[in-house]
């Protein structure tokens, strides 16, 4: 353990240094409080033994400054003092000293108090490590709670969190964004024909294809069943149509057989809508509803196509998201 001895008396300083050296500690010394602060700023010191009476910055002020700065973890502080009045000892403990030894000090007593400090520092280190592991575990749990375990993309919960932030930023800075709802065509028929395990593999493949096709600034989420929602910042309606067509083609390029689909292979339908500061819609739920209406139209028109919600349309009553013909 690295120990800093702060003592202006050469004899006491030398005695402490030699005694603690013999116990296997790394000892550094300072003659006053200011020099001690410079040594502490370099890091690594875990225990300080400081005289109360020091030139310039005394032991009390040194202790106060150490307690104000905990960047390098906790530092155990033992005060050496010739003061033996109860109120003076209490004053030293109140500013943050962990222990004290009265002068002239007994070296064996000091060793015992240093061992007590070591135990506390070891406990503090152990607690810090456990807290860090707990924080990492909680962060991992939070991340897992936002990810769909099958498709390995965001889930509905994380969609709600993300879209609220995207919409708020779009309103604040007058930035457009688009939503695309993707629905795998005739997916129930696929499960009925090939089995649910094969259906799961298709969903994973589809999610991977979408992730590889969209921009890094876009985000894709599993909204429910075989339905996905893609958030695309800074896109107008024409750009959304192009992007959705590109994703549709990427899914077709997987060449997955689907005898229950009119095309004979896996395909998907898309509905898109865009928010901008001139939109009549002022909630993200309205944009989602518009994209859902466009998807309903794509399904009704024969599937495997992209439909965009036109600003001239009105958001009327549609099937709830996830209930398509």
Image: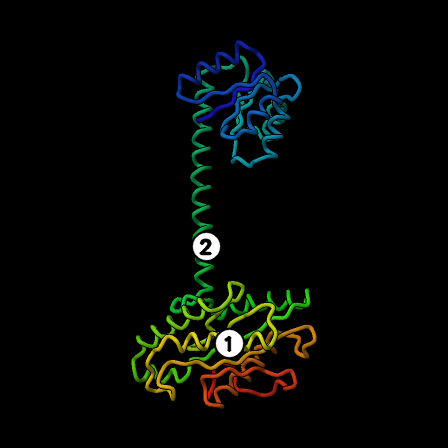
> Seen in the image, is 194 located left or right of residue 117?
left
Does residue 260 sit above or below 63 in this rendering?
below
Residue 246 place in picture, x, y as percent: 48, 75
Residue 154 image point, x, y percent: 47, 67
| Residue 138: mark | 2
> Which residue appears at 49% of the width and 77% of the height?
245
Label pair 1/2, CB-CB below 8 angstroms: no
Residue 163 coordinates in the image, percent (x, y): 57, 69
Q: Distance between the residues labelled 1 and 2?
A: 36 Å
Identify the residue at horizontal 51%, vertical 15% (top origin): 105
Mark 1 — residue? 244
What residue lies at 50% left-to-right and 12% top-to-bottom?
14
Badge nearest the viewer, 1 or 2: 1
**Mark 2 Cα-neighbour bin, 10 Å: few <14, some 14–19, many ≥20:** few
Q: Residues within 10 Å of mark 1 (few under 14, many from 20)?
A: many
Residue 184: image location, x then y, percent: 42, 80
Q: Which of 224 and 241 is in front in this view?
A: 241
Image quadrant where residue 294 sits: bottom right
Secondary structure under badge 1?
A: helix
> What mark, if any, has residue 155 been given in the picture?
none
The quadrant where residue 35 appears: top right
């Amino acid at each position: 353990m690295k120990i800093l001895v702060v003592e202006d008396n050469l004899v006491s300083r030398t005695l402490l240094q030699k005694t603690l050296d013999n116990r296997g500690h790394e000892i550094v010394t300072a003659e006053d409080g200011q020099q001690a602060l410079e040594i502490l700023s370099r890091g690594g010191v875990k225990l300080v033994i400081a005289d109360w009476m020091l030139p310039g910055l005394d032991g009390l002020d040194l202790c106060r400054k150490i307690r104000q700065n905990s960047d390098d973890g906790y530092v155990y502080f033992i005060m050496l003092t010739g003061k033996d009045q109860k109120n003076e000892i209490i004053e030293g403990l109140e500013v943050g000293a962990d222990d004290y030894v009265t002068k002239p000090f007994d070296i064996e007593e000091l060793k015992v108090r240093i061992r007590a400090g070591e135990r506390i520092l070891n406990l503090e280190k152990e607690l810090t490590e456990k807290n860090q592991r707990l924080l990492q575990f909680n962060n991992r749990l939070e991340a897992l709670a936002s990810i769909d375990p099958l498709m390995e993309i965001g889930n509905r919960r994380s969609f709600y969190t993300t879209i609220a932030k995207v919409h708020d930023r779009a309103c604040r800075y007058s930035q457009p964004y688009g939503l695309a709802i993707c629905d795998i065509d005739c997916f129930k028929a696929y499960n009925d024909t090939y089995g649910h395990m094969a259906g799961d593999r298709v969903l994973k493949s589809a999610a991977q294809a979408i992730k590889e096709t969209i921009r890094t600034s876009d985000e894709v989420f599993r909204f429910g069943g075989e339905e996905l929602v893609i958030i695309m910042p800074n896109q107008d309606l024409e750009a959304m149509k192009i992007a959705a067509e590109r994703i549709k083609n990427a899914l077709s390029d997987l060449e997955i057989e689907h005898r229950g689909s009119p095309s004979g292979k896996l395909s998907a339908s898309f509905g898109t809508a865009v928010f901008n500061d001139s939109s009549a819609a002022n909630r993200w739920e309205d944009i989602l509803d518009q994209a859902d209406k466009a998807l309903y139209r794509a399904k009704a028109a024969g599937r495997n196509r992209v439909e965009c919600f036109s600003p001239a349309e009105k958001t009327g009553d549609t099937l709830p998201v996830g209930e398509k013909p």
